[in-house]
Amino acid sequence: MKRFYKKVSVAEADGGWRVLLDGRAIKTAQGAAQVVPTPALAEALAEEWRAQGEEIDLKLFALRDAVDFALDLVAPDPRETIERILAFAETDTLCYRGDPDEPLFARQQEVWEPLLTACEHRHDVRFERISGIIHRAQPPETLARLRSHVERFDPFTLSALQALSSLSASLVIALEALREGTDGAALWDAANLEELWQIELWGEDFEAKARREKRGAEFARAMTLAELVRG
C-alpha cells in the first residue's frame, strides 16, 4: 500500500488521546475509535506512522496491533483475556524445578526463587514448588488473590500482560515485567533459563536463537506498551 498521508499529529479526544493523519482520526482494525489513555502512548503510535516510507510496511505497526487488540477484543469483555492470563498462574514455569540433586536445580533456585518469593510477598500468596513436570494445583487462595489483582488492570495493560505471560509461560515473570524499572533483559533470560542452560552444555542452535530473539523482541514491546500506559 502506498503512503496516503503527509502529516501525523496527536490530539486529545473523548477523555484520551488519538493519532491524526492529515487531521483525520485513526480507527482500530474493527472500526472503533482508537483512543488511548496517555499522550506518551499516542505519540509512540504516531511515531509508527511517521516511520513509514513511500510503501507502508505493516510489520512496523507492532504497537498499533497491540492497541487494537486491547480496544477491539479485550475492552468489550475482558473475562476471556483474564482467564488466559490466570492459566499461567496454575502452571507457572517458575514453580517447576529439577530434582534437588541436579545442577540445574541450583540455577533455578538462584534465578527463579527470588522472583517467586518477591511475588508471594507482594501479593500475600503462596506458590507450590514442584520437582519434575507432574502438575500440582496451586492453592485456591493464591489463584483468587491473583485474579483480584489482575481484574483491576485496564484493557491495554491486560493486552500487555497476556503477551508477557504467554511468551514467558509465567504469570510471575509477567507481573514483574509490569513493574517500573524492571530489567527486561534479565527477566527474559529468566524465562529462558532452561534453554540457556542447555546452550551452556551443548552449544547454540542458530534457528532456536533466532526464535528466542524474535520472541524476546515481542516481550520487550509488551513491556513498552505497559510502560506507555503508565505514562
Image: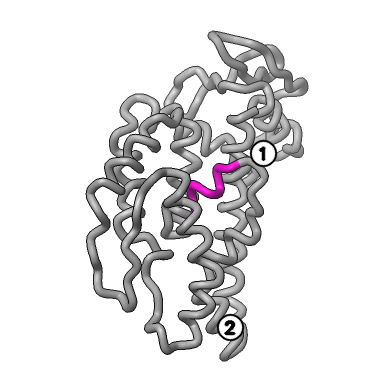
Q: Nearer the viewer, residue 74 or 54?
A: 74
Eyeballing the image, is 57 above or below 204? above
Q: Quadrant of the C terminus?
A: top right
Q: Which residue is mark 2?
A: 199
Looking at the picture, the colour scheme in use is one colour
Q: Dot 2: within a 10 Å radius of its alpha carbon, few (fewer than 14), some, or many (20 or more) residues?
A: few
| Label 1: which secondary element | loop
Nearer the N terminus, badge 2 or badge 1?
1
What's the mark number on residue 56?
A: 1
SS for dot 2: helix
Identify which residue is drawn at 62% across, 37% down: 227
Amino acid at circle 1: Ile
Depth check, front residue: 193 or 24: 193
Q: Quadrant of the N terminus?
A: top right
Identify the residue at the far top of this view.
14
Q: Which residues are magenta?
A: 173-179
Q: Nearer the viewer, residue 138 or 13?
A: 138
